[in-house]
Image: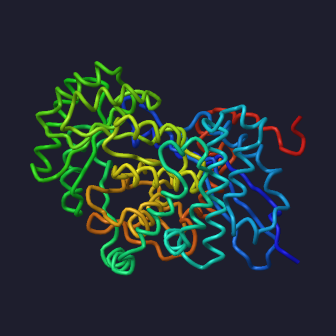
Amino acid sequence: MAALITAVDTYDIRFPTSRDLDGSDAMNPDPDYSAAYVVLRTDEPGGPAGHGFTFTIGRGNDVQVAALDALRPYLLGRPVDALCADPGSLSRDLVGDSQLRWLGPEKGVMHMAVGAVVNAVWDLAAKRAGVPLWQLLADADPAWLVSQVDFRYLTDAITPEEALGLLRAGRAGRADREADLRRRGYPAYTTSPGWLGYSDAKLTRLARQAVADGFTQIKLKVGADLADDVRRCRAARAAVGPGIRLAVDANQRWDVAEAVAWTTALAEFDPYWIEEPTSPDDVLGHAAVRRAVAPIRVATGEHVQNRIVFKQLLQAGAVDIVQIDAARVGGVNENLAILLLAAKFGVPVCPHAGGVGLCELVQHLSMFDYLALSGTTEDRVVEYVDHLHEHFLTPAVVRAGHYVAPTAPGFSAEMHADSIAAYTYPGGTFWAADLAAQGTEPPCVVPEETAP
């Protein structure tokens, strides 16, 4: 009998990163990096499970898990072969459900939950095929890849026929690029020196270490206090020298006029890009900032909610750098659409990866883009942060400033069972002991089978 999806397990996993200010920025000063995590289990004897997640920063992760739980009925009993042969079928069903769609549409907590389960299906498909996801996608027939993309709302910018042409053209020289990828890896940059809560001494030490480790670009968080930012940028530039790119990231902190003034004030340090200078939904605001601060580039995307807003950013000439996020939008399928849009408009993609497991996931999308679509790594880098990788079975590996191409089958999404057991909130062993030490009662959690 054909294998079926028999269980959809969900977990509220949180890490106490706020205690060391890892991940801190002007808008999010105390993040506890978290994952609303889902596992798709099957009745295939000895077969793999599919793992996926979406990233949050602590409070509200329980809400995100509830959204995952709401999708369980759409997955249980689904034939595994058909699901893995056409992940787009699940994406269409989930995005198209009229009542769930009302909660977005195609944005927010519900859409992120869709992305997590869709990504879990791709993880399952790649594991069953015995290849890493980047290879599954790069080897795929261009027409099949086009069938995985929802072109609704996009055809004024890119049509399926144009997408097919881009993918067919992208196959030229693929073998040489794959050999290069396996030998050298994919370029990375690091945000690890630049968290806003770090002291100047720690920033300087980590910036120097980044250069020693082979990175040619680092990124600093800015936006809380201009005098602090000038001082920190001066320290960073002194630490890395003139030949290293220095990007800055405001995490949506500013209004348009403030973004222009603040970025201009930092221009003496030669910032390569200003990231998220204003609201991620403000297409025209980004365009105005871009015109005013050139030649400093404008980058955004980690909080862009769907392919439609990316389309508008590109149509309006509002961005120099597209920053996809593996878990913010509706999973691999929607990210394929965004990569195709970026290729059509000739804008480089430099993904966001600051968070739980985002480095592990998004490396696959950039590697596919290089092999099968853009054909280049020029002015393209994937973000890297150096924490929480130890919780994954196949953690991202960076050597000499480059992501090493994964070889293990899947989407690199699977966490160690011990990490899940320890950091599931609030009953995991770490959190139970931590709450007890603080004399705090854990939040009341209603068991699923007795929930109203």
Tell me the quarter of the image containing the C terminus: top right
Taking the image as shown, residue 17 lies to the left or right of residue 334, namely left
Looking at the rendered image, the quarter that the N terminus falls into is: bottom right
Measuring from the top left, give residue 415's x and y in whole percent: 59, 61
Tell me which corner region of the image, top left, top right, bottom left or bottom right, holds residue 273. Answer: top left
In this view, 164 is above or below 205: below
Query: In screen coordinates, is 411 left or right of 302?
Result: right
Report the side of 269 relative to 261 (left or right): left
In the picture, measured across the screen, residue 179 lies left or right of residue 332, that is left
**Residue 430 seen in this snapshot:** no
Residue 365 location (% of width, % of height): 47, 61
Tell me: residue 157, above or below residue 215. Answer: above
Residue shown at the point (66%, 50%) measured from the top left: 428
Q: Where does residue 6 sit, x and y in percent of width and height?
A: 83, 63
In this view, the residue in front, 63 or 370, is 370
Q: Nearer the viewer, residue 53 or 274?
A: 274
What scheme was used to colour the molecule? rainbow
Q: Tell me what residue is drawn at x 26 percent, y 68 percent.
A: 400
The number of discs equals 0
The image shows residue 221 at horizontal and vertical percentages of 31, 37
